[in-house]
Amino acid sequence: MNEDTIAAVATALGEGSIAVVRVSGAEAIGKVAPLFKSREDLRDVPTHTVHYGWIRDPASGDVLDEVLVTVMRGPRSFTAEDIVEISTHGGVVAVQSVLELLLRSGIRMAEPGEFTKRAFLNGRIDLAQAEAVIDLIRSKSSKAFQVARKQAEGALSKRLAPLKEQLIELLAHVEVNIDYPEHDVAEVTAGVIRDRCGIVLQQVETLLKTAAEGKILREGIVTAIVGRPNAGKSSLLNALVKENRAIVTDIPGTTRDIVEESVTLSGIPLRLLDTAGIRETEDVVERIGVERSRGALGDADLILLVLSRSDKLHEEERRLLEELKDRPTIVILNKSDLAPRLDEGEIRSLYPAERVVSLSAKEGMGMDDLERAVSKLFMSGGIESGDATYVSNVRHISLLHAASRSLQDAIDGAEQGLPVDLIQIDLAAAWESLGEIVGDTASESLLDQIFSKFCLGK
């Protein structure tokens, strides 16, 4: 690890009331002190204190900005090193001039995610907690933020710690059997492997059961709104985003291209795609829009098929109902405020009741029923705000699957009477997979790959 002192802008660039430049490293305080004009010398101030003054260029004597400087001495800091945070006026010029002065003073520009990487390498957080930091920043809903916050506090790491400990104890037992076979019999060791691996495997599988819902919270659901022209697709989009995002008219074929918006329903982030009405048409532009609608159908995680209750079922709609019945589809019977002409029996014979919702997008009636339908389709029982067990990171899910396979192989090997030194390989692989989640067995290239996804100031 580099022992030099690093700096980066920790806030988003652009106009704002303040911006923060973060400096971390063994010489952070000593490097910033000569640049800070104040009644106090930063080298003498207590930790976790804030000081008023100016950043001045020693070479020219020019004052760059009026600032507040926060000093946090290691190990009681995010990186476990000395940290200085300079709060400047917001705006590109002020921030850039302060950062350039720091870089001219022998401080290096931080690499993406290097502050968090140092926190990990210095033992303040583990790798799962470090990855949760970026999930906090990118959270698309309050529930996703709550899950990420729990992970950043070490919830997953605490769940994995006793599992790794049990595997270590089991590996030690196997090692003793290999080295001193006269003190044990194969049947006893096989029984111990089956029982203990079974306990660990059950806990791993419990975590994996949360993966689908955790991934939804983290990444959101690609949702295609489809149907025939004038069924009310654009009205539904506007009702969901609570603004007039899509043009609504009585003229069929108004929507020619895909309109995209994001919304959160019951804590579940949806990426909405309002598509062109699906129908046969001679209009060249509209036909392209229909083709794109078909493409959106193929990519969607959720399909909202909008039908008009005030119209009889069209043959094109019958084909869509049949085509989509085995896909994650919710049928929306729109225009419930108008006199019904649609035969709902035909629809309800193909779709269960919880996947058919009556509403009026124009009047905003029945939207709560749609929220409940989406939640029931994707979240088994919903997510409690205090739940700390959800696994959402793709890397973690893959490693848990690898650990599960290794544990099952170890159990199968014990039941088949394989030599314990062969079973030991599977036990070690399971331990390594769980350890890689928290960074115990992570390679340098993996660390570089993970932290490169972070922003510069984090």
Image (cartoon, rainbow, N blue to C red):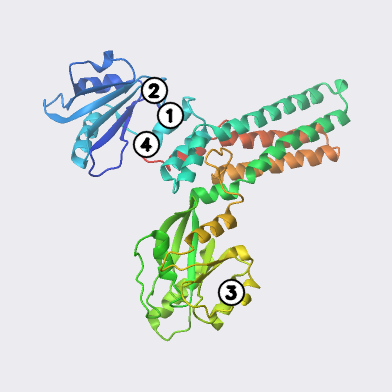
Residue type highlighted by circle 4: Glu
User: Element at badge 3?
Assistant: helix
Q: CA distance from mark 3 to mark 4?
A: 51 Å
Q: Specify few, some or many for label 2: CA neighbours under 10 Å numbering under 14, 14-19, or 20 or more.
A: many
Label of residue 111 in the image: 4
Residue type highlighted by circle 2: Glu
Question: Where in the figure is residue 47, as x and y percent of width and height?
Answer: 33, 17
User: Element at badge 4?
Assistant: loop
Between disc 1 and disc 4, the foreground one is 1
Vertically, is 404 above or below 269? above
Label of residue 118 in the image: 1
User: Element at badge 2?
Assistant: loop
Q: Are marks 2 and 1 in contact (CB under 8 Å)?
A: yes
Q: Specify few, some or many for label 4: CA neighbours under 10 Å numbering under 14, 14-19, or 20 or more.
A: some
Q: Which residue is mark 3?
A: 321
Marks 3 and 2, the one that precedes in the sequence: 2
Residue type highlighted by circle 3: Leu
Residue type highlighted by circle 1: Arg
Q: Are marks 3 and 4 in contact (CB under 8 Å)?
A: no
Marks 2 and 1, the one that precedes in the sequence: 2
Q: Which residue is mark 2?
A: 81
Between disc 2 and disc 4, the foreground one is 2
Left or right: 22 as drawn, with respect to 89: right
Q: CA distance from mark 1 to mark 4?
A: 11 Å
